Amino acid sequence: MSKIKGRPAEGSGSVSAYIPPSEEESSGDEVEGTSVRRRHVWNRNARSVEPPRDDAIYYPQDDTFGLFDQGRDYEPLNITHKYTDEEKKTLGTYDSHDYLPTNSEVYRKWLKRQGPSSYNLGRWTIMGLIGFFVGVIGFLLHDLIEEIAKMKWEIAQKFIKDREFGVASVFAMGYSLIFILFSAFIVVFLRPSAGGSGIPEVTGFLNGTQIRHIFNVKTLLVKFFSCVAAVGCGLPVGPEGPMIHMGALVGAGLSQFRSETLKINLPFFQRYRTSEDRRNFISAGAAAGVASAFGAPVGGLLFSMEEVSSFWTITLSWQIFFCCMVSAFTTDLFNSAFDGFSYTGNFGQFKTQRYILFNIEKGIDVNILMFIPTVIIGVIGGLLGAIFTILNLKMTRGRKKLLSTISEHTILQKLIRIFEPALIMIIITLLAVFLPAVFPCSQYTCKEGMTGDASVNCLNDTRNPLHVESSVVKYTCYEGQVWKDDKYTWKTNGTYNEMATLMFGTLENAVKHLFSRDTHLQFGFASLLSTLVIYFIMICWATGTSVSCGALVPMLLVGGLYGRVIGILMTTMFGVHSGEDLSYWAWMDPGVFSLIGAASFFGGVTRLNLAVTVIMMELTNDVQVLLPVMVSVMISKWVGDFFTHPVYHALMELKCIPFLDPEPRVTIDKNRINLELYLARHVMSSPVTSIHTKDCVHDLAKLLLDTSHGGFPVVKVLERTGDEVFCGMITRLELSVLLTHEELFESDGSQDDSGDSGNGEQDPTWIEYEQINILKLKNPKEISHTLQKYVKNPAYKTRFLNLKQYINQSALSIPEKFSLQRTYIIFRTLGLRHMTVVDSSNKVLGIITRKDLMGFNIVEKVSTLHDARLEMRSMAAANQSSVA
């Protein structure tokens, strides 16, 4: 074994930092000021360093950044995120994993036994099963939420109608508190990792980072019931984010047919238990979650491709497309048969209002003049999207800072996390019950035919132009007397309450009202702007609490509000035009601009172009406004990128989850640097611990105990020169498993480096690929004690382990002068965990890991070179000027 000389740079050999034995053995307590934990024995990843157990309570004590310092929460797209020293240590505690499985000899033997027949058919079968179960979960989730919300507001409105506001508020608060306390309780006490949307964690995992407990049956159950309770009781959040996480959970569990929690390990689909297949199925599950939640199968495919997944192929596109199709079909099928869990007798009849969430029945002709307000809406969407992201991050950091001042795991800390969403629920409920009383009642306004002037005190029963929807909320307003005047029109002197219409019921109901067409005068500026301010702040606050929730539908609500304000402003300035004889100006419909605003805010927060555009089309069935939606989404992305990173990437940075962007964006002194000018050796970690194809058991055991590297380069000795040259990689987990099989140990330490055995006969004693193809150790304590025995017993200094059958012979290596830009692209595109750097003689010089390629690390390592180049450039310019 090639010994390491001194302490290597952080990230050497894995995303983890090198931990000296003295530190590992000193204490099992938490290191002061950080969440990095040392253990006497290993965890299940064969390491003595624990990643954060609960990100919600971790806050770096060395955070001295100002409120508006660039590189923290306010960070334009091309500005590299700045981490504190403690956050860098936290980054180093996460394990990484390869996208492709280890290409060893035992793997190739195992692959041959699987046989080519029905191999791809099995994948399609699993994709279909994932889509079906995600569709069922989506149906149950939405119907339970609707039933909980319906009961709350039906009873509350009865009290309000009788002007018993006190009773109504007490009932609504009590009803809501029961559900919200339950929602937060099960997250805080049973599974903290089930909190939030889960999208940053799923994205981080698919990017190559191992994150604890995010794919666990217990997480799935807690996520489901917490989301149902939180969204159903009226917290200003949505179920779409959790649906994406739950879809990924189904993809992770169903495809493997094994569960540690349920003690299940069925032999079905065992051939698909590779890192590649597992990540593909998780990507499919996340996409199916979007398809079920929004009824948008194509949008789900694009969301997974654009945001969640880091590896993509054409074949995977078709498989995920099929999975999304099955998911949406299953949800629609159940929706056709059941309404509130009551059988409708319409099994198989896909009614538009059920399977298109915000169905638009009447389209409008796009006019070139329409793009002027569309551009304005796009700019507003980018600005408000950036403000939303920054405010959400500031609130999350403030919450972490407060919780970090309280001793970890105390009941006070847990109670604060439980009662925070309860406080939001109390505020929202009181506002919903009492705030509409501040607003006057509005009269119904409509046209009594296809043309004519607007008339108050009338209510159409058809989709004639200019009307007020019959589903508006009366609150305490006078209902009036209704009679039939002619074939088309109901006349009434009744009134309704605009604010109650927006705040009663679920957020989806409010969005439907905002998107409605030919309802130009249904809402006024006061109700829309008041609701915008309230929900903008409350959604920012609520989405970071300890409940399972998302913010996708809330984003549509916020965007729909300011979009409708722009639309009403247009009709105020240029008049109401909705008749057939004025069709040239019919584009000035507030409902149209509400839809465009929703898309702009959605895009301004997430920065997703393709997915947002397609999702909005599938949500509304209004393809006529495709071009304006595209324009607003693009502009909101450009404006948002000027202020912040996309919200899910920013949350990964806040949670210290190692993540590599699709392309490197590294800035020094606010100038983006060209990584083609730098080399791989400029960022590699060196020196490196390498091992031989046949190495001493005592040395291997000591290596594992003394370091926390995730993998090791394997070298072989050339007979002619005696040089050690690179021949593959082996991971820490694989080496740990091999060392538990003493039957593999040999007494002969001579190197057998004559070459790869290829398809030759297997060694007499060997273990199957299934035994080393594991995600975690089953008995880490026992294994760590076994390794300590190897180190203490001198007999194992003469025992050797032959690794030739188990090393990854397709491990990638690059020359030291390889372009840093291309190094990043290869590493990220192939989903690597380690990349070995070699010299011209194929000797190992260093190693590159995920952490080495993160922006902050590249900045630290190339800053000196960058400054030197600038100095040389300035000197050259000075010399030229003196010569001139």
Image: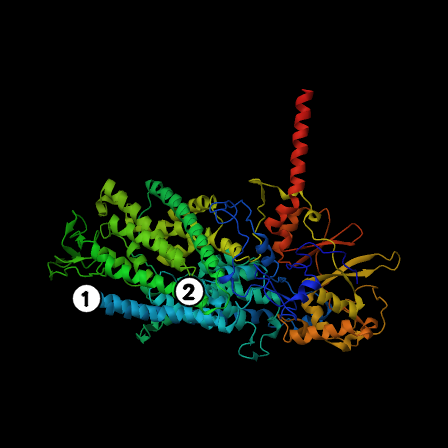
- Please name the residue that numbered disc 1 is placed on: 164
Label 2 secondary element: helix
Q: Is residue 829 left or right of residue 153?
A: right
Q: How is the image coloured?
A: rainbow
At 84% across and 74% down in the image, what residue appears?
747
Q: Amino acid at mark 2?
A: Ile
Can residue 128 be seen in the rendering of this structure?
Answer: no
Question: Do tag 2 and tag 1 residues touch (Cβ < 8 Å)?
Answer: no
Residue 129, percent across and down? 49, 72
Q: Is residue 333 left or right of residue 265?
A: left
Give neighbour class at mark 1: few <14, some 14-19, many 20+ (Cα, 10 Å).
few
Toward the viewer: 707 or 480? 707
Of the 4 image quadrants, the one containing the C terminus is: top right
Residue 266, percent across and down? 58, 79
Give neighbour class at mark 2: few <14, some 14-19, many 20+ (Cα, 10 Å).
some
**Residue 798 drawn above or below residue 476:** below
Q: CA distance from mark 2 to mark 1?
A: 32 Å
Kindly identify which numbered label has been placed on residue 317.
Answer: none
Q: Amino acid at mark 1?
A: Glu
Kindly identify which numbered label has been placed on residue 416.
Answer: 2
**Residue 692 drawn above or below residue 593:** below
Residue 698, percent across and down? 78, 70
Of the 4 image quadrants, the one containing the N terminus is: bottom right
Residue 188, percent across and down? 45, 69
Numbered disc in front, either 2 or 1: 2
Q: Is residue 525 left or right of residue 708?
A: left
Where on the picture, by quarter, is residue 545?
bottom left
Outermost residue to the top? 884
Label 1 secondary element: loop
Can residue 54 be seen in the rendering of this structure?
Answer: yes
Earlier sequence position, callout 2 versus callout 1: 1
